[in-house]
Amino acid sequence: MTATLEFRNVSVRFGSGRSAFQAVTDASFTVPEGTTVGLVGESGSGKSTLARAAVGLVEPSSGSILLDGEDVAHTRGRHATLRRAIQMVFQDPYSCLDPRMTIGESIDEGLRTRATRDPSHRLGRTGRRDEIHRLLSTVQLAPSRASDYPQSLSGGERQRVALARALAAGPRVLLADEITSALDVSVQGAVLNLLMDLRREFGLTVLFISHNLAIVRHVCDAVVVMKSGQIVEAGPVTQVLESPHEEYTRRLVAAVPHVGVPLFDTTQIGTGA
């Protein structure tokens, strides 16, 4: 079941007094249900901070983050379970997996998270084992890998496990934060294809955070451009990237290599590679 994610006048401030840093200022945009929206900008522009605020890792200083109209940014206690319908996959697939836990145990954490939010999804030991195996197959890993540890996997395989763990929590919205930037170019296309397939299969709404406009053009329906914590442009991906209104966006687009020298092998996206 998809959901609409809306950032409404969100600001994030770290610290206080003279040492305070304004990471995000009055950011507003919507990720309509069932779509993939790209969030782009240079490092430090506030992209990841917004995503972390959506999943509760950062507390907005003002504004609201709405999941189908319900504010999940300032929830406490029982109501905080609403936010668990938003799951995030991070840039580094190794640092977000506990090296002391098997792959199956990591995915099981996601299953328990879903059961907390929705008791109808509580499973016994056998049911959880079967669901772990199903999810591994869904992300194109052998179910037998459930007993492996993260250090025995390649970067691409770890990112697949991270996706499986996120799916185990039964998300309605998936936040993908630079999920291919730490991977070899040879496996980036396969992981992106998998993400696109999962969006269709599970009916996900996706916020795709990236600095790579070549990838954004191929996987996103719309794009939001951030600069120094503020949104400077937004619209359909083709419109923004082909006819940008803002000078900052034009500079980002100009930084993408010209035809014949691609920033990313986009021929591998959508080919089942």
Image: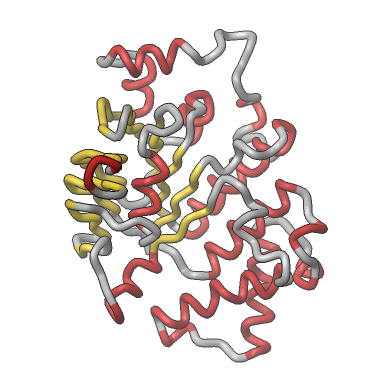
State whether residue 204 is above or below residue 269: below
Residue in the image at 52% along x and 80% along y: 112
> In the rendered view, does 254 fall on the left or right side of 268?
left
Query: Where on the picture, by quarter, is residue 73?
Result: bottom left
Q: Where on the picture, by quarter, is residue 1?
A: bottom left
The image position of residue 72, as x and y in percent, is: 27, 64
Determine the residue located farthest toward the bottom in the rendered image.
124
Query: With respect to residue 30, does 112 lie above or below?
Result: below
Residue at left 32%, top 71%? 82
Q: Nearer the viewer, residue 164 or 96?
A: 96
Considering only vertical position in the picture, is 62 above or below 21?
Answer: below
Q: Nearer the viewer, residue 26 or 172?
A: 26
Query: Which residue occupies the foreground of this view, 66 or 182?
Result: 182
Where, quadrant-wise, is the C terminus in this rendering? top right
- In the depicted structure, whether residue 138 falls above or below residue 129: above
Write down the quadrant of residue 110 in the picture. Answer: bottom right
The total number of labels drawn is 0
Which residue, as the protein is rendered here, is positioned at the far front? Answer: 18
Q: Position of residue 20 (x, y in %)?
A: 27, 43
Residue 161 image point, x, y percent: 66, 59
Q: Residue at x 65, y 24 (%)?
A: 265
Query: Which residue is more in the foreground, 142 or 43?
Result: 43
What's the colour scheme? secondary structure
User: Is 245 left, or right, of 184 in this rendering?
Assistant: left
For image coordinates 34% across by 46% down, the residue present is 50
The x, y position of residue 45, in whole percent, is 37, 32
